[in-house]
Image: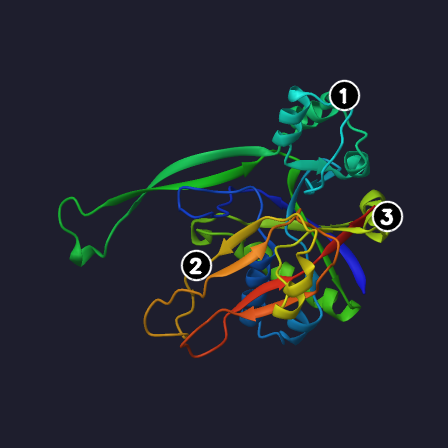
Amino acid sequence: MKTQIIRLSFNSPVHFGNKRLSDSEMVISSDTLFSALFIEALNLNLDTDLLMKDLVISDTFPYCDTELFLPKPLIKVTAQNQDDTNYKMFKKLKYVPVSQYLDYVNGKLSSNDVKKIIEEFKIGTYNMQTKVSLKEVEKQEPGDSEPYAIGTYRFYPNTGVYFIAKGTSETLEKLMKIMDSLQYSGLGGKRFSGYGRFTYQVIYDEVLKQLLLQKGSSHVLLSTARGTEEELETCCEEARFILKKRTGFIQSASFNESLVKKKDFYSFTAGSVFTQPFKGEIYDVGENGNHPVYRYAKAFWLEVS
C-alpha cells in the first residue's frame, strides 16, 4: 500500500462540531472525514467500493508552517527532573511536533521543552457568532426570528490540518478526484454558509515518513477506530486508551421519512496505545432505514518502542 500526506488550508472559518452547535474543534476525526469523502463520491457518481475495502485514513491533525503535529500518545513517559511542575506541564500537552515525537516517547524532553511546545503552538482562534434563523415568510409572526450561537474556528495563515491516507495507487487516485470536489463543498457543518472550504496539497515529509516505517512493541492509534468483537477480546489487554461516544442523526432524506438517530457507537480515540493492534472495520449504524449508514472505524497505526 502507498501512503500520502494531504494538507488542507482553510480560507474561511470552519465549524467542526462537537456536541453542541456553539462548540467547534480544531480537527475532525477519521469517521467524520470518511463520511464527507463517501458522500462526495456518491454525489460524483463514483464507485465507492475502493473507499470501503482499501482506503485507510488517519484523523486530521494540525500543522504550522512546515511542522506537522501528532496527538500526544497515552504512553507513560519518564521525563527529566520529575516534579509537580513537570507533571502539570506534560498533562497540558495535547499535540507533539513530529520532529520531537520520538524524543517525547523516549522521555528526552524536559518540562521546559514541553512548555516551549505549548507556547509556540499557535494554530488559530475559537470564535462564537450569533446568527438569526428566519421562518418561512408566510408563517412569520412578530418575534419569530430565532437567534442561535455557532462556534467556529479560524486558522492563522500558514496553518491548517492534514491527514494520512493509505491505499493502492488506484484508490489514492480516486481519493484525489474526491478531494478536488470536496474542497469546494467544504468540511464540517454550516457549509451552505460558506464554512469549511479549503485548498489541499499532497506533501512529502521525510521525518513523518520514517516515523511511519519504524517498528516497535507499542502501537499508537492515529485514527478514531474500534476493533471487531473478536479483536476486542484481546486488544484491550495492557492497553491505554480513551473511549469516545460517537452518535448523531442520519442526514439522508432517503433513509426514512422521519429524522432517525444513528446507533450509539464507542470508538478508541487517536493517541490510544495498544500492545496488540487490531484492524477494525466499517460498521453499519443505521436501523430501520432504506440503506446502510456507515461508521468508519478502521485503525491507522504508528509503532514505537
Mark 1 or mark 2, whichever is nearer to me: 1
Left or right: 140 as drawn, with respect to 1: left
In the image, 290 versus 241, the foreground residue is 241
Q: CA distance from mark 1 to mark 2?
A: 45 Å
Distance (Cα) linking label 2 and label 3: 37 Å
Which coloring applies here? rainbow
Where residue 13 is drawn, which disc sits there?
A: none
Q: At x 69% / y 62%, what residue is drawn? A: 234
Could you tell me the amino acid type at mark 1? Asn
What residue is shown with label 1?
81
Neighbours of disc 2 within 10 Å: few (<14), some (14-19), many (20+): few
Inspect the image, locate mark 3, and give the three-letter code of the amino acid beneath it.
Gln
Looking at the rendered structure, the secondary structure element under dot 3 is helix
What's the residue at 81%, 62% (across, down)? 2
Q: Could you tell me which secondary element the residue under label 2 belongs to?
A: loop
- Residue 298 visible in the displayed image: yes
In this image, 148 relative to 297: left or right? Answer: left
Q: Tell whether 108 sits left or right of 148.
A: right
Q: CA distance from mark 3 to mark 1?
A: 29 Å
Locate residue 185 relative to residue 168 in the image: left or right: left
Residue at image location 81% in from the left, 38% down from the top? 102
Name the residue beneath numbered marker 2.
248
Q: Check residue 210 in the rendering and tell me which mark sits there, or answer none.
A: 3
Residue 29: give x, y in percent of width and height: 58, 52
Where residue 104 appears, x then y in whole percent? 77, 34
